[in-house]
Amino acid sequence: QVQLVESGGGLVQAGGSLRVSCTTSRRSFSINHMGWYRQAPGKQRELVARISSGGSLNYADSVKGRFTISRDNAKNTVYLQMNSLKPEDTAVYYCWARERDSWTEYWGQGTQVTVSS
């Protein structure tokens, strides 16, 4: 079982920046993809960004050019740097990881990001 521990998030004004981090309890060699999803009130959970162990990236169109995902395999940690934040970025952000062989998925507990206008 893999546990994902998130940190960061909080309240920021529009145009500001935040960084969220997520550390796994298992060494990264068993984890292929890691990333972030978000869920706003009344909306479905959606992909924000994800990164493979080889560095392949995927971003939601709504965050391209503003958010950057990165990964430190030595620290078993994935980061999401969020710049030029907008009120519509307000959501609970969930860390996500998927194992290489079994494709088992894991989720963090979520961290709130609130962007005020």
Image (cartoon, helix red, strand yellow):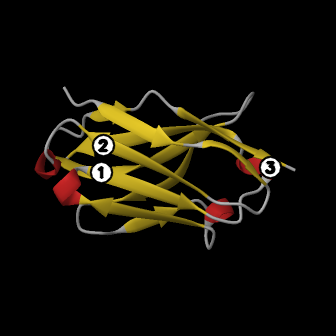
Q: In this view, does 44 lie above or below 62?
A: above
Q: What residue type is labelled 2?
A: Thr
Pointer 2 or 3: first along the chain? 2
Is the Cβ of the residue at disc 1 closer than 8 Å to that at disc 2? yes
Residue for point 57% across, 43% down? 9
Name the secondary structure under disc 1: strand
Extreme residue toward the bottom, this view: 65
Which numbered disc covers residue 77? 1
Q: Is residue 33 above or below residue 59?
A: above
Name the secondary structure under disc 3: helix
Q: Is residue 60 above or below residue 96?
A: below
Residue for point 35% across, 53% down? 78
Extreme residue toward the right, this view: 117
> What crowding class fits label 1: few (fewer than 14 Cα within 10 Å), some (14-19), or many (20 or more)?
many
**Which image quadrant for residue 16?**
bottom right
Q: What residue type is labelled 3?
A: Pro
Pointer 1 or 2: first along the chain? 2
Alpha carbon distance from label 1 to label 2: 4 Å
Pointer 1 or 3: first along the chain? 1
Give residue 46's position: percent from left, percent from top. 58, 43
Is the Cβ of the residue at disc 1 closer than 8 Å to that at disc 3? no
Which residue does the numbered mark 3 point to in the structure image?
Answer: 87
Q: Which amino acid does label 1 sit on?
A: Thr
**Total numbered badges shown on the rendered structure:** 3
**Which image quadrant for residue 26?**
top left
Which residue does the numbered mark 2 point to in the structure image?
Answer: 23
**Which image quadrant for residue 86?**
bottom right
> What crowding class fits label 2: few (fewer than 14 Cα within 10 Å), some (14-19), or many (20 or more)?
many
